[in-house]
Amino acid sequence: MKKILAICLFITTIMQAQELKTVTYKDGNQKLNGLVTSNSEKNLPAVLILPAWKGIDNEAKQAALDLQKNGYKAFIADIYGEGNIPKDNTEAAKIATQYKKDYKAYQHRIKLALEQLKKQGINIDKIAIIGYCFGGTGALESARADLPVVGVVSIHGGLFKDPTRTNNIIKTKILVENPADDKSVTKEDYNNLIKEMNDGKADWQIITYANSGHTFTNPESPEYNKIMADRAWKHTLLFLEEILK
């Protein structure tokens, strides 16, 4: 059944791909290729999507299309850049780890994507960021960098932060969607994040999803849990509606 759902999602995403338009931008000499929804209304609330560790994937594309249907302009960031898209998990782990260690470079790439989103005629006072996996880590980094967004959603993101970094005031509202059986998140990571949010006097919430492994929201993953994935998406939309509409 999971394989059938994954195939259906893939076909649907391909059929709707024309609704997403490529936006090319640069970081120095590095070419970046983001994707933006085709809804042309002006002054819409907007969402920047940070994809998982293999770069822009079907889950990110489907999220953008779903956000469009819910009245948002959505932009999928290209963090790695043209020519740097990992071919497998080993390459993905290597490049994602580099950005996690050099968090300022990660924050910079997110900021560049955010600037491209702002050029789409959106309401610049109503922007949120959501991210999956590696992108979920990026969502938290966006809050730490005090980027000009009103809220972030970390969806099965990495919660680790180098303990040598200080905990600062966090103005951005934060929703963390955490799978209960995520082996990549330790209890220490979880507790440290709560301490960071409290130290930062943040408006934060963590929702934990039972019987869910790391990639529980991705229909193409063997860890996909449709019930919990659907709940998580409803929670995401509820959060976005609260802060953007």
Image (cartoon, helix red, strand yellow):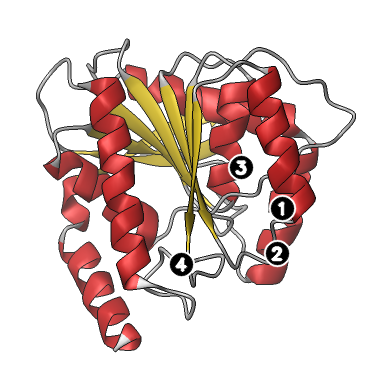
- In the rendered view, would you say 110 is above or below 18? above
Report which residue position mark 2 lands on: 91
Say above or below: 77 vs 209: above
Residue 181 in picture, x, y percent from top left: 59, 68
- In which quadrant will I find the N terminus? bottom left
Residue at numbered disc 1: 95
Q: Residue at x 39, y 72 (%)?
A: 225
* Residue 74 visible in this rendered orientation of the protein: no
Question: Residue 216, which numbered label?
Answer: 4
Q: Is residue 18 above or below residue 68?
A: below
Dot 2: within a 10 Å radius of its alpha carbon, few (fewer than 14), some, or many (20 or more) residues? some
Q: Earlier in the sequence, mark 3 or mark 1?
A: 1
Image depth: mark 3 or mark 1 in front: 3
Q: Is residue 221 above or below residue 140?
A: below
Between marks 3 and 2 in the image, the one whose residue lies nearer the viewer = 3
Which element is circle 1 on? helix
Q: Is residue 155 left or right of residue 119?
A: right
Q: Nearer the viewer, residue 138 or 35?
A: 138
Residue 100 spot, x, y in % from top left = 73, 42
- Look at label 4 and name its amino acid: Phe
x 76%, y 58%: residue: 94
